[in-house]
Amino acid sequence: MSNIKYILGHFEDPDDMMHGIDKLKENNISIYDAYTPMPIHGIEDKLGVKRSRLPIVAFICGITGTFTGFSMIYYMMVHDWPMNVGGKPAFAFPDFIPIMFELTVLFCAYGMGIAFFFRTHLFPGRAPRVMDLRATDDRFIIAVDANENADHDKINSLLKDAGAVEIKHNERRYVSYE
């Protein structure tokens, strides 16, 4: 078995890279990922990337914040230390709304940030996982999993036909910045 894990096709133009993705998909070659120095509209659809579940996490964190705010205020104002303020009842729901709103926003913001860092492995102290350092500078890279696709010569020729300026065979999974 080969030590090659990924075949990387380097492109100088995003249109050439999109054309390369189309050519590989036409020949039933699975693409591991594409790395670009800037966002490219429509690349998620071509690669078959699923929609993010971050809005679901945001909703769950928001509901948790709302429930925490309500239960905290209810416990403090009704059970633990009820006060008669201006003849109002201890359970005056309109007074609870601002604090519930603020805790909803707080829990949602922190929850989404933590979920994002956890999912993308970008939390502090972790070295970034990059296939090729030039992908963050000026190159558009298509990574093809060499273990799933056996015909390496066919992949090389398809990438060359699509306009790849360089084709590399990676033996390691990621390159470190160090």
Image (cartoon, grey):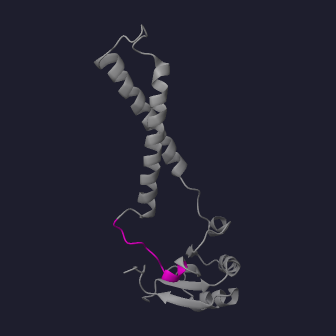
Residue found 47% across the figure and 43% down from its top: 108
- Residue 105, placed above or below residue 96: below
Q: Is residue 167 left or right of residue 90?
A: right
Pinpoint residue 14: horizontal percent, then vertical percent: 67, 77
Magenta region: which residues?
A: 125-135
In the image, 162: left or right of 90?
Answer: right
Q: Which residue sits at x=52%, y=46%? A: 56
Q: Nearer the viewer, residue 58 or 49?
A: 58
- Residue located farthest toward the front when viewing the structure as drawn: 86
Picture quadrant where residue 158 is located: bottom right
x, y percentage for residue 94?
50, 20
Is 134 part of what is drawn in magenta? yes
Front one among 156 and 12: 12
Q: Is residue 102 visible?
A: yes
Whether residue 163 appears in magenta in the rendering, the answer is no
Q: Is residue 40 above or below residue 168?
A: above
Horizontal relation, residue 124 to residue 44: left or right: left
Image quarter (top left, top right, bottom left or bottom right) of the C terminus: bottom left
Quarter of the image containing the N terminus?
A: bottom left
Spot occupied by residue 67 in the image (x, y as percentages of width and height): 43, 31
Give the overall secondary structure of the magenta segment: loop
